[in-house]
Image (tube, helix red, strand yellow):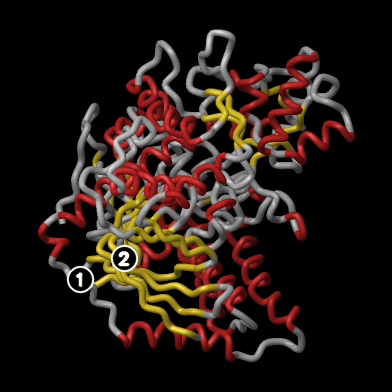
């Protein structure tokens, strides 16, 4: 492998929504442009700073917005306030949120939306020129090209370099201070040792931990991008970063088989959840995100399934709007309607997905302060990888990218960072290359196909163990302490076998590292599920040993940190209600 050492001021790992906007934020004022286009997006005195964005795919079509989206689900509509949004997110998460984080993003929702529109995003407007709303917090967009718009803005930004198809797999951390990262180019056989004065991690959440709805060839037809493997989480966990609320898993309620979104049906045409008897059941269980899933599971278990969103009888205009809307985000659902019964003629069957760990819909992720600093000095988190602020969606990820960027620049320009020297040693580079070459040198089966399936086999075993023992679809998302203990043993046994895997090229090496990342996150999820001795969010964390809510002992954050190879659980008190600022005390 070729070895390339790079130096930059700010390293952004992950070129998705938050990562792209972080780069745009720093670069806008670095160019000295204080135009209306850059208003609200820039950083003061950022001129001369070098920014490097590293993405394992290509930023033009990577991350959660790769295929587009038809609405911005976090927006302060007319007559509403940021406080209203904070209260909504707080209620949906039953109080386990960071109000300071929610405030700081909700106050920026409309600002970043206006910036997106200036960059070229088409936002639907009524005859009076006002945004077309969908419910109390959403606005409609034509968002098929939202990610290429962000990528184009990054490409135009001064002092920004983008490395596509480079897989970052480890941080460089010394004395709890980050000074860079390690990765390899999937297409150019190059090992990268990147020194940086500050790092923003924006790699997204974790999919693929549990067995999905659809097996075999269709296993990647899931709610969350299958390429989001929890890499950012795993790197932080291994280096002792404090993590939060992994037990608040996210389970999406989706259209059966296609795994297409249901929010457009529920909010766009007012479709109610009904069972096979035609009874509306959503009022019986509640309408929070987790309760919608829980009610569907319960109705099926009690023999009143299948469950549906009732669309029969909608108007021709509503039906046409649905067919068009799903072309923007889930074309397979529109195709299914065209090939079979359209939504006005047949209700849409629904089901829950497998669980995911994601900080954009739930509160899972890095424990950060209001500036989005993690507990590793110099490391900032934004988007789905940052914990504490659920229901952030697209605009929240953009807002966090901006906040993290401004904070990272402030850190770089501070006296302590200005004199800090990178400390990546040649020995560290050699050790990482040796591990990669070990995977490339091992002998596998008789054919390339047999060898590549080894990763798939271990991944399937991991998913089966999590599904059966850590609250997957198979058990109706339920788990017990005994089951979690079995899950941990199974994950540890699989983890011990990873070292024997073989790769033919760096693409296959990446698959091995992705498996390692998922296994690391699995262990943290199991530890968090075991630590919360209550059931606060039905389905998201359905603990059969503790089926009731316990506000006295567990109206707290369940955090964790890896110490001496063991996951240490930390219970933290909720931040003071209305608190607008929280800082770490190292």
Q: Is residue 499 visible?
A: yes
Residue plotted at (20% across, 41% down): 582
Instruction: Locate residue 468 relative to residue 568 in the image: left or right.
Output: right
Foreground residue among 505 and 37 = 37
Residue plotted at (45% across, 60% down): 162
For label 1, the SS is loop
Foreground residue among 391 and 166 = 166
Residue 484's x, y, as percent? 50, 58
Identify the mark nearer the N-term, 2 or 1: 2
How many numbered marks appear? 2
Foreground residue among 195 and 359 = 195
Instruction: Locate residue 236 relative to residue 285 in the image: left or right.
Output: left
Q: Is residue 247 visible?
A: no
Q: Which residue is mark 1?
A: 175
Residue 234's x, y, as percent? 42, 63
Residue plotted at (39% across, 86% down): 431
Q: Are marks 2 and 1 in contact (CB under 8 Å)?
A: no
Residue 535's x, y, as percent? 45, 39
Foreground residue among 302 and 147 = 147
Categorize mark 1 by other alpha carbons within 10 Å: few (<14), some (14-19), many (20+): few
């Amino acid at each position: 492998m070729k070895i390339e050492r790079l130096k930059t001021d700010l390293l952004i790992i992950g070129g998705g929504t938050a990562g792209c906007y972080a780069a745009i934020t720093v670069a806008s004022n670095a160019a000295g442009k204080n135009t209306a286009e850059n208003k609200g997006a820039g950083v003061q005195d950022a001129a001369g700073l070098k920014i490097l964005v590293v993405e394992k795919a290509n930023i033009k079509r990577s991350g959660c917005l790769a295929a587009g989206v038809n609405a911005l689900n976090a927006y302060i509509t007319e007559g509403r306030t940021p406080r209203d949004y904070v209260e909504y997110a707080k209620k949906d998460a039953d109080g386990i949120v960071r109000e300071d984080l929610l405030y700081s993003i909700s106050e920026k929702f409309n600002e970043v939306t206006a910036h997106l529109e200036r960059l070229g995003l088409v936002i639907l407007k009524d005859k009076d020129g006002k945004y077309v709303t969908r419910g109390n917090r959403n606005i409609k967009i034509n968002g098929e090209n939202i990610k290429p718009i962000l990528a184009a803005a990054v490409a135009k930004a001064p002092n920004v370099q983008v490395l596509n198809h480079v897989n970052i797999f480890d941080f460089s951390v010394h004395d709890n201070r980050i000074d860079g990262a390690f990765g390899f180019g999937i297409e150019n056989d190059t090992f990268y040792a990147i020194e940086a004065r500050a790092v923003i991690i924006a790699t997204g959440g974790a999919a693929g931990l549990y067995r999905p709805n659809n097996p075999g060839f269709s296993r990647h037809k899931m709610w969350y991008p299958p390429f989001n493997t929890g890499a950012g989480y795993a790197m932080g966990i291994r280096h002792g970063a404090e993590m939060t609320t992994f037990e608040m898993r996210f389970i999406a309620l989706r259209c059966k088989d296609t795994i297409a979104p249901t929010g457009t049906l529920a909010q766009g045409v007012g479709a109610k959840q009904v069972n096979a008897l035609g009874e509306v059941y959503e009022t019986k269980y509640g309408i929070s995100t987790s309760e919608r899933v829980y009610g569907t599971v319960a109705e099926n278990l009690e023999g009143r399934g299948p469950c549906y969103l009732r669309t029969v009888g909608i108007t021709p205009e509503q039906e046409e709007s649905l067919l068009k809307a799903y072309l923007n985000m889930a074309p397979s659902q529109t195709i299914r309607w065209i090939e079979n019964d359209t939504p006005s003629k047949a209700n849409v069957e629904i089901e829950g997905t497998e669980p995911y760990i994601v900080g954009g819909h739930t509160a899972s992720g890095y424990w950060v302060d209001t500036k989005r600093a993690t507990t590793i000095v110099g490391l900032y988190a934004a988007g789905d990888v940052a914990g504490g602020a659920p229901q952030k969606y697209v605009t929240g990820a953009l807002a966090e990218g901006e906040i993290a960027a401004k904070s990272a620049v402030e850190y770089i320009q501070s006296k302590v960072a200005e004199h800090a020297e990178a400390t990546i040693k040649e020995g560290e580079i050699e050790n990482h290359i040796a591990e990669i070459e070990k995977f490339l040198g091992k002998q596998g089966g008789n054919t390339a196909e047999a060898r590549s399936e080894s990763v798939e086999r271990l991944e399937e075993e991991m998913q089966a163990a999590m599904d059966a023992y850590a609250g997957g679809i198979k058990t109706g998302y339920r788990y017990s302490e005994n089951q979690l203990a079995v899950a941990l043993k199974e994950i540890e046994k699989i983890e011990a076998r990873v070292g024997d895997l073989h790769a033919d090229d760096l693409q296959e090496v990446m698959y091995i590292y992705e498996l390692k990342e998922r296994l690391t996150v699995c262990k943290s999820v199991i530890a968090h599920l075991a630590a919360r001795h209550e059931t606060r969010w039905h389905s998201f964390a359905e603990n059969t040993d503790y089926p009731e809510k316990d506000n006295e002992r567990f109206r707290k954050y369940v955090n964790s940190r890896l110490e001496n190879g063991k996951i240490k659980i930390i219970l933290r008190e909720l931040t003071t209600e209305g608190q607008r600022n929280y800082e770490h005390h190292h």
